[in-house]
Image (cartoon, rainbow, N blue to C red):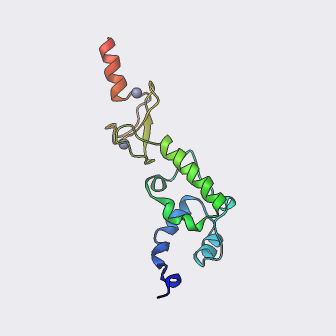
């Protein structure tokens, strides 16, 4: 039995979308698929103000072998931080989509979780709304 040749080709599943999330050049993509290179920090860009929704919700660790150690450390740290930043306080999922921040406690919620179809100028989460009601 030859274990070295048993690595599966399904490793490439979803890699195109992963590369798009991180704004990787087409030339780099092609080299990468040939396994002629690994992604370096310079190849990757993350828009931290609008992180890719799918990236936050998905397990990118299966693509770890496509990154250099340095690049992987940098990207996994950024992703962990972004996932924390964009965690919805209602559903607890770290999934960046249309989100709104409570003016009072600065927690984030999905519009859908907050039962909003569009964001009002000011919004308070259920916790803060009920606190406020008790006072008045
Ligand atoms: Zn939510
Ligand atoms: Zn609040």
The quarter of the image that holds ligand 2 is: top left
- Give the mark count: 0
Q: Please, which residue is most extreme toward the right here?
A: 42
Residue 33, given in percent of the width and then of the height, sits at 58, 76
Q: Quadrant of the C terminus?
A: top left
Left or right of 45 on screen, residue 5: left
Q: Residue at the spot x=61%, y=55% of the render?
A: 73
Left or right of 43 on screen, residue 124: left
Residue 75, given in percent of the width and then of the height, sits at 59, 54
Left or right of 104 on screen, residue 75: right
Residue 108's place in the image compared with 47, above or below, is above
Q: Please, which residue is most extreme toward the top here?
A: 136
Q: Residue at the spot x=39%, y=37% of the render?
A: 89
Q: Please, which residue is most extreme toward the bottom here?
A: 1
Task: State the image quarter where residue 67 is shown.
Answer: bottom right
Task: State the image quarter where residue 34 is shown.
Answer: bottom right
Q: Residue at the spot x=46%, y=88% of the render?
A: 1
Residue 41's place in the image compared with 102, above or below, is below
Residue 114, given in percent of the width and then of the height, sits at 34, 36
Residue 90, given in percent of the width and then of the height, sits at 35, 38
Residue 59's place in the image compared with 129, above or below, is below
């Amino acid at each position: 039995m030859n274990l070295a040749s048993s690595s599966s080709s399904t490793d490439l599943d979803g890699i195109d979308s992963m590369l798009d999330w991180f704004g990787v050049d087409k030339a780099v993509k092609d080299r990468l698929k040939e396994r002629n290179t690994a992604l370096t920090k310079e190849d990757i860009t993350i828009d931290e103000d609008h992180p890719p929704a799918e990236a936050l919700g998905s397990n990118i660790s299966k693509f770890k072998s496509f990154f250099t150690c340095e690049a992987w450390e940098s990207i996994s740290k950024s992703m962990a931080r972004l996932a924390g930043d964009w965690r919805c306080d209602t559903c607890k999922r770290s999934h960046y989509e249309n989100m709104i921040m409570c003016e009072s406690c600065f927690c984030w919620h999905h519009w859908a979780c907050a039962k909003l179809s569009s964001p009002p100028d000011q919004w308070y989460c259920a916790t803060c709304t009920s606190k406020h009601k008790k006072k008045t």
